[in-house]
Amino acid sequence: MRVLVAGFWVFSAVLGCFGSETDSLGLVSPELLKAGGFETVWQTRLPIKKGESLERLFILGQRIYALSDHNYMVSLSRQNGNIIFGTSFAEAGFSVMGLALYQDRLLSVIGNKVVEIDPDSGVQQNTTRLDLGIVCPVARNSSCFYIAGSDRRVHTLRAEDKVALFEVAAEDESMITSIVADDGIVVFGTNTGTCIGITPEAPKRLWQFDAADGIVGPMVRSADALFFASRDTNVYKLDIATGQLVWKCQTAALLEDSPRVTAERVYQYVRGSGLTAIDSESGQPVWQLAKGVELLAEAGGNSYVITKAGKLVVMDNNTAKQVYSVNFAKVSRYVANLTDSLIYIADENGRIACLKPIE
């Protein structure tokens, strides 16, 4: 996930210029919001201790999860910002890799442990330790956990009792970078560009696809398709059942992060070239924003994008043109919302707000 620290933002929207007057939380100017066509749904301050800072935001289901640089986690309702729980998620200094929601459990990797957390209380329910390093976020389906180890193998553990069932690796034993799983298929990608689909219950290969270079970041499953970025400069879409190439879209540089996938578009950040929006059906670029770094949300045919310069830019997906831009002072943390029009912004001190475009 890209989390960027922005400098002080200077408002330069086509709607006019405004001062830095802020609300009681000191995060967003009401006048600036109004001029930019936004309304505040809610805003609050996270219970982050002095000396800590907000590091990452996650959207999972109907919750926002905020993680500090000391691994303190706060869960909030997406609808009203009410705090569900706050807990010490891991000891300070331990790496936290990924956060996913599977049925009634949050799944994450802390060091060499897979942890399962109650999403209503933040209490750890189960912990599974591997005798080797874990190299990418864990995946699971109704019957198994699939864990990529530093030994370059996927370790399959039965969900009910964590009994090891089988291991599988690519033929070149390349390092695994991502796993996706459901009850019909398990797919893993590697740092040499190999992408392999296997049966969930045994290491039986269903298909293999080879990109020209390594798969970076998490692969993304959307309906019957699989999307991923490669260091060969291409974004790929595969048919997940067969592994057949649907399309590939070449970008201007080596890719370092996974794409953001919505119902109609794929957004890919390219270092040095900004954010590119790609039509998910044709694979053709729709627009490119040279300073764009992250999609925040989509609404009414528009895409809301944060730029490197600290502006919120609104792109019209029909005309492929910029509609207007707005700057929000002191915002330095944000997260891509791929499901609706709500925009979540925050700063390192734990002030967080939910905004909605006024349609």
Image (cartoon, grey):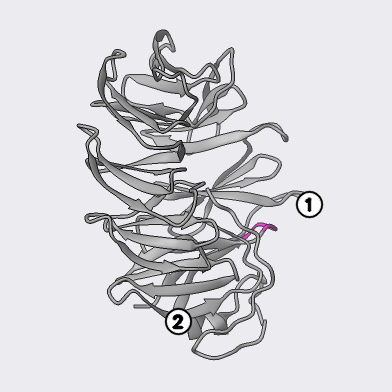
Label 2 packing within 10 angstroms: few (<14), some (14-19), many (20+): some
Magenta region, residue range = 348-352
Q: Residue at x 27, y 58 (%)?
A: 264
Query: Is 93 situated left or right of 83 in this image?
Result: right
- Residue at the spot of label 2: 324
Quarter location, residue 8 = bottom right
Q: Main secondary structure of the magenta part?
A: loop
User: Is residue 109 found left or right of 170 in the rendered image?
Assistant: right
Q: Label 1 amino acid?
A: Lys
Q: Quadrant of residue 213?
A: top left
Disc 2 on helix, strand or loop? strand
Q: Nearer the viewer, mark 2 or mark 1?
A: 2
Snapshot quadrant of residue 112 = top right
Q: Three-letter amino acid code at disc 2?
A: Tyr
At horizontal 42% and vertical 9% (from top left) the residue drawn is: 164
Residue drawn at (51%, 30%), measured in percent from left and top? Answer: 136
In magenta stretch: residue 302: no
Question: Which numbered circle lies on residue 50?
Answer: 1
Magenta-span inclusion, residue 350: yes
